[in-house]
Amino acid sequence: MQNTHEIAPKLHWVGGNERRLQRFENLFPLRFGVAYNSYLIVDEKTCLLDTVDSSISQLYIDNVEAVLNGRNLDYLVVNHMEPDHCGNIETIIRRYPDVKFIGNAKTFQFFEQFYDFDAKKNYMIVKDLDEIDLGSRKLRFYTAPMVHWPEVMMTLDFTNHILFSSDAFGTFGAHNGTYFADEMDYRRDHLDEARRYYSNIVGKFGVPVQGIMKKLSNEVINMICPLHGPMYRNEELALILDKYDKWSHYVPETKSALIIYATMYNNTESVADTLATRMGQYGVRDMRVYDVSETDPSYLVSEAWKYSHIVIATPTYNTNVFYKINNLLHEFASLNLQNRKFSLVVNSTWGGQTLEQLQTMIEKMKNVEIIGEPLLIKSTLKEDNMQALDDLAKVISESILNS
Ligand code: FEO
């Protein structure tokens, strides 16, 4: 069996889809599967860029053999040595024993950590800006450490202006018969998943992402080929570059409020909804209200990357912050979320240090501000809380509408 697609002259997508996997990295829920992209250039020399996850090995090998059509494989470039892309290095080298396995020193260190297969005779160690000549096109390697992992490289076909970008610009979701973002309703169906992928997987590494974008800024790039999801050219290329610029600078895309609550008996939910309604009455639009227990944190991380203002509403649990809120805030901090305005709602029946704990967690993040007086509720929202609720709604709304 085989399923390949020539995405540009002499450049073939030879990857595959995985729709049975429930969670990417056994962590992030996949509603529409995931694609593992691998690319094969068939020029005077042949060159394979990355492999795929071991779950789709048979299809992958068939794809590579079909496109090579009896030719030998000269180069295997490994831009990223994470197992979702490395599951077939050994198989490729066994099949094409003279292939030059291109990576940097860290690539080979990680290869030897993950696999016992001895491929040292195949190693071709490259450094930043080294080049190879495939005949009608040349490739240049750019080290991009920490654009997910330290060994990451990007490879530029600077003859055809095609960037093989590793995990950067990747998206959750399997392919649906077309491969370019401009061949689908990308903004409607894929942009949110691209943000969820970025924020959860690469979001922590905004500075390295800015570094590689700056390094490539003098290059003409007409196409980006990531390791997951659709490829980019034309308007969608400009769109995703603009998004990456914002996302890596932690600049919110939407001036509005993300309201995240925890609730045990619907009382804190009721406060969150009432606050949202008041903000709507003050003119705020496009808010989102989420129950932290019902929504996977990866979606909330993604929304936090999008929204300028974040309201956290939590009951007190065992004298502390409700642990799913606690975990989420820990994740925000761990992913370096910054440049946001937070507001707080704390519900408590019999005591605790919840407000202080929330403030401590939030103040650890860079360039964040807590706006408005924290709204303190005793068990349920009462009439005598309404003035304080209204005051908080007004402060957040004015901050959104006047910023
Ligand atoms: Fe798709 Fe960092 O691996």
Image (spheres, grey):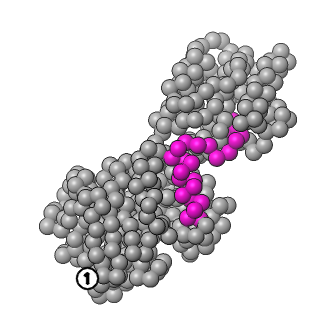
Question: What's under tag 1, amino acid-wise?
Answer: Asn
Which quadrant would residue 295 be assigned to in this image? Answer: top right
Q: Which residue is mark 1?
A: 72
Which residue is most to the top? 351
Identified at 57% across, 62% down, the residue is 238
Direction from residue 259 to residue 150 in the image, left or right: left
- Secondary structure under the numbered disc 1 in the rendered image: loop
Direction from residue 38 to residue 117 in the image, left or right: left
Identified at 51% across, 31% down, the residue is 366
If the image is split into quadrants, where does the C terminus sit?
top right
Query: Would you call the spot at circle 1 few (<14 residues within 10 Å), some (14-19), or many (20 or more)?
Result: some
Asked if 137 appears above or below 155 in the picture, the reply is below
Report the magenta residues as a range: 236-261
In this orientation, does residue 175 appear? no
If the image is split into quadrants, where does the N terminus sit?
bottom left
Direction from residue 50 to residue 124 in the image, left or right: left
Q: Is residue 240 magenta?
A: yes
Give x and y (percent) for residue 213.
45, 54
Which residue is most to the bottom? 70
Give x and y (percent) for residue 385.
80, 18
Camera-nearest residue between 143 and 149: 143
Asked if 336 appears above or below 238 in the picture, the reply is above
Identified at 70% across, 19% down, the residue is 373
Give x and y (percent) for residue 275.
78, 30
Identified at 75% across, 26% down, the residue is 395
Direction from residue 138 to residue 169 in the image, left or right: right
Camera-nearest residue between 52 and 49: 49
Q: Give the total of numbered labels.
A: 1
In this orientation, does residue 232 appear? yes
Which quadrant would residue 353 be assigned to in this image? Answer: top right
Give x and y (percent) for residue 128.
29, 58
Asked if 369 appears above or below 44 in the picture, the reply is above
